[in-house]
Structure formats: structure tokens, C-alpha cells
């Protein structure tokens, strides 16, 4: 621990900060979250889901996941497609792939038991320092603090420090230094709740903060920060998709291969441009079945706004078509993950062609 942190927050002051944070948590904290408890499996699932996703968005997906896979034994029986299906719509699909990879590692390297050692947890796919700390501490297997986005914002304002790589070590030191000895699990949850509910990105509720008297930025003013927040530039792209349907009303779906997006999910074939789409139809001998109309809709990811250009290909006969017989599905038969845009394709198709 650096001398600066210790001198700024001596024992008596540190104890007061801890007490104020925990007193606030006892009254205002989110103690009713569905993953609260010490089941390390459920904590792991929730912490992976919460990476880059807000609590309210995670809750329904978490409940569905745990209903389907209540423990490791049930997850061991799942395929990657099974995990992807239940994850569909939550986004950042690499997290689902990491859960599947981790389940295999646990079977092969940890005798089917989720590891309780911090370094072992940190070694698992998709788990960084904050996630490993949260899993270890919430499950009662250690005392580690965290530094997620909410905590980073809270502590950087508390210190009145610029948030950049040069300050991260100081924030980690302060986060760990203030951590409660007796209630570490409640304390790191309090950290996150204060950052999310009080020390908000814009219009923070400084007068409700339990440690505003010790905060170096109180009352926080955006003008205290020398540089304006960098706006995320949203890219706009065209994407082409071919909706292939046969005379039985079945759709042709395949595993997506598009710039590493939607990895592991299935959809109608997608292409970077119309030329690639036309080449694909020629190589699979289905160009003659294409319709001339093109439908369009927009679909947004966090950093990209796609304009989908959809062409229908209604195949009447299969004799000369070189498409795999294993890739045709009725809508009721889809038992794997599909992206949200594919639901839009299905819904638009049904509205245009009165599909039942």
C-alpha cells in the first residue's frame, strides 16, 4: 500500500468511510438480486452476464439460464448451441462461449468442481481481475475488492483523479484498502450500488452519497474534469442477407461468419455486399429462384448501425441445389441461438408473406 493512500486515509478515517458505506448499503443497497448468496456457480454466471451489461437487462436472462441450468452438472450436459440459444438477445456472445469453454475446463482440470482459489478462477476464460475478485468474495472464499466501471467512477471522483491508465493502480489500491474486513461481500456490492445509483455518470446525487464529506470532488461538477468525455463514433454499414426458403416452408440457416460478430449463432446467410451474395447464389445454384424485391431495416449494436438489405430466395425444387439438407428448419424446430436481427427477418417475412 502506497504511503499516499495510507496518509490520506488513516485508520480512523478509513473506519468511518467503511461504516458510512455499509450503513448506506443496509438501507439502500440492492440486496434482493436473484444471484445473491454464496453459490459460486450462480455467482459466476451472474458476473459473466454483468460484464458490459446493466443489471436490469441481465436479470431475466439470468433467471432463464438458471432455470435451464441450475448447477454445473446440468451445464456439463449442454452443447455450445444450447448455451448460445438461451443467451440469444443478451449480446457480447463471446461471454456465452467462455461459459461453455469454462464448463469443459472444470470437468477436465478441476474434477467437476468450480475452483475456489482466486488464481484458479482468474485463469478461466473471459475472467479478469474484477470478475475473479467478485466471484471469490461473494462466494465467501476470499477478500478481494473490485474496480468495475461504476466503482472506477466513484473512486476517481472520491480521489478527484483523472481516470486513465496511470491512475488505475491508485484506484485499485484505494479500493482494496477501504474494503471491509468483516463484510467484504456487502462492501463490494455497496461499491457497485453507490456507483450505479448515486455516483451516476451524469447528474450524480452527491447529496445522497454516504461519503460526500470525505469526497475530494464534493459537490461534483463536470467542469472539474479538464477533458470532455469522448463520444463513441457509431459506424454505419450495409449488410446483405439472403432469406432462403423451400417448398415445405423451411428456412435455410447456417452458422454466422461475419467479422467475428454474432459468433456461434445461426441465421440466414449474411454478406458484406451484394456482389458476395450473388456469387454465393451462383455457387449454390439457386440464383434462378431469387426474387427481385429487396426489403430493408436497421439494426443497432453498441458501436455499429447496420442497414440490412434482404433478398428472398424461394426454392421450388431441390434436385440441382447444392445446399446441405441438414440446414433446413421450421420456425418451431429452431433449438439453437439466433441473433436479434434474425427475429426481425422472420417477423418481416411473416408480415409480407402471411407465413404461419
Image (tube, rainbow, N blue to C red):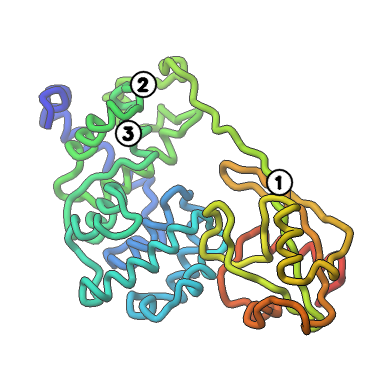
Q: Which of the two labelled residues, at mark 3 and mark 1, occupies the earlier sequence position? A: 3
User: In this picture, is 246 found above or below 341?
Assistant: below
Marker count (numbered): 3
Question: Which one is in front, 233 or 244?
Answer: 244
Q: Which residue is pictured at 36% across the width and 55% down the height?
A: 31
Q: Which residue is pictured at 29% across the width and 47% down the height?
A: 130
Residue 346 coordinates in the image, percent (x, y): 74, 66
- Name the quadrant of the N terminus: top left
- Of all residues, the one furthest to the right in this rendering is 292
Q: Which residue is mark 1?
A: 238
Kindly identify which numbered label has been placed on residue 210.
Answer: 3
Residue 205 coordinates in the image, percent (x, y): 45, 30
Kindly identify which numbered label has been placed on residue 218.
Answer: 2
The label nearer to you, 2 versus 1, is 1
The label nearer to you, 3 versus 1, is 1
Disc 3, SS? loop
Question: Which one is in front, 130 or 100?
Answer: 100
Question: Which one is in front, 246 or 209?
Answer: 246
Residue 117's image quarter?
bottom left
Q: Which residue is pictured at 44% across the width and 63% down the height?
A: 96
Residue 99 coordinates in the image, percent (x, y): 38, 65
Do the residues under discs 3 and 1 have CB atoms within 8 angstroms?
no
User: In this picture, is 151 found above or below 49?
Assistant: above
Disc 2, SS? loop
Q: Which residue is pictured at 27% across the width and 64% down the height?
A: 38
User: In this picture, is 15 found above or below 212?
Assistant: below
Mark 1 surroundings: few (<14), some (14-19) or many (≥20) residues within 10 A = some
Spatial distance from mark 3 to mark 1, Cα to Cα? 49 Å
Amino acid at each position: 500500500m502506497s504511503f499516499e493512500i495510507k496518509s490520506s486515509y488513516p485508520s480512523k478515517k478509513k473506519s468511518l468511510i467503511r461504516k458510512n458505506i455499509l450503513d448506506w448499503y443496509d438501507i439502500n443497497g440492492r440486496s434482493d438480486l436473484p444471484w445473491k448468496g454464496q453459490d459460486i456457480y450462480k455467482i459466476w454466471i451472474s458476473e459473466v452476464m454483468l460484464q458490459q451489461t446493466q443489471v436490469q437487462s441481465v436479470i431475466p436472462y439470468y433467471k432463464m439460464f438458471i432455470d435451464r441450468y441450475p448447477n454445473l452438472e446440468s451445464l456439463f450436459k449442454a452443447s455450445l448451441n444450447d448455451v448460445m440459444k438461451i443467451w440469444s438477445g443478451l449480446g457480447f456472445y463471446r461471454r456465452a462461449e467462455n461459459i461453455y469453454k469454462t464448463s469443459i475446463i472444470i470437468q477436465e482440470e478441476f474434477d467437476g468442481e468450480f475452483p475456489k482459489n482466486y488464481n484458479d478462477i482468474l485463469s478461466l476464460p473471459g475472467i479478469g481481475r474484477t470478475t475473479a475478485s467478485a466471484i471469490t468474495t461473494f462466494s465467501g472464499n476470499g477478500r478481494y475488492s473490485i474496480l468495475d466501471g461504476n466503482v472506477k467512477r466513484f473512486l476517481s471522483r472520491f480521489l478527484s483523479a483523472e481516470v486513465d491508465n496511470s491512475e488505475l493502480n491508485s484506484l485499485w489500491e484505494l479500493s482494496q484498502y477501504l474494503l471491509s474486513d468483516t463484510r467484504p461481500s456487502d462492501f463490494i456490492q455497496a461499491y457497485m450500488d453507490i456507483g450505479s445509483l448515486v455516483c451516476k455518470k451524469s447528474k450524480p446525487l452527491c447529496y445522497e452519497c454516504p461519503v460526500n464529506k470525505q469526497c475530494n470532488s464534493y459537490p461534483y461538477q463536470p467542469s472539474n474534469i479538464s477533458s470532455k468525455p469522448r463520444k463513441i463514433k457509431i459506424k454505419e454499414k450495409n449488410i446483405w442477407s439472403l432469406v432462403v426458403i423451400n417448398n415445405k416452408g423451411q428456412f435455410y440457416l447456417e452458422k454466422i461468419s461475419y467479422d467475428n460478430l454474432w459468433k456461434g449463432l445461426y441465421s440466414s446467410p449474411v454478406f458484406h455486399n451484394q456482389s458476395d451474395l450473388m456469387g454465393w447464389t451462383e455457387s449454390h445454384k439457386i440464383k434462378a429462384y431469387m426474387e427481385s424485391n429487396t426489403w430493408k431495416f436497421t439494426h443497432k449494436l453498441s458501436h455499429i448501425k447496420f442497414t440490412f438489405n434482404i433478398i428472398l430466395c424461394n426454392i421450388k425444387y431441390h434436385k440441382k441445389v447444392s445446399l446441405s439438407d441438414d440446414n433446413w428448419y421450421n420456425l418451431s424446430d429452431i433449438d439453437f441461438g439466433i441473433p436479434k436481427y434474425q427475429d426481425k427477418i422472420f417477423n418481416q417475412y411473416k408480415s409480407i408473406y402471411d407465413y404461419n
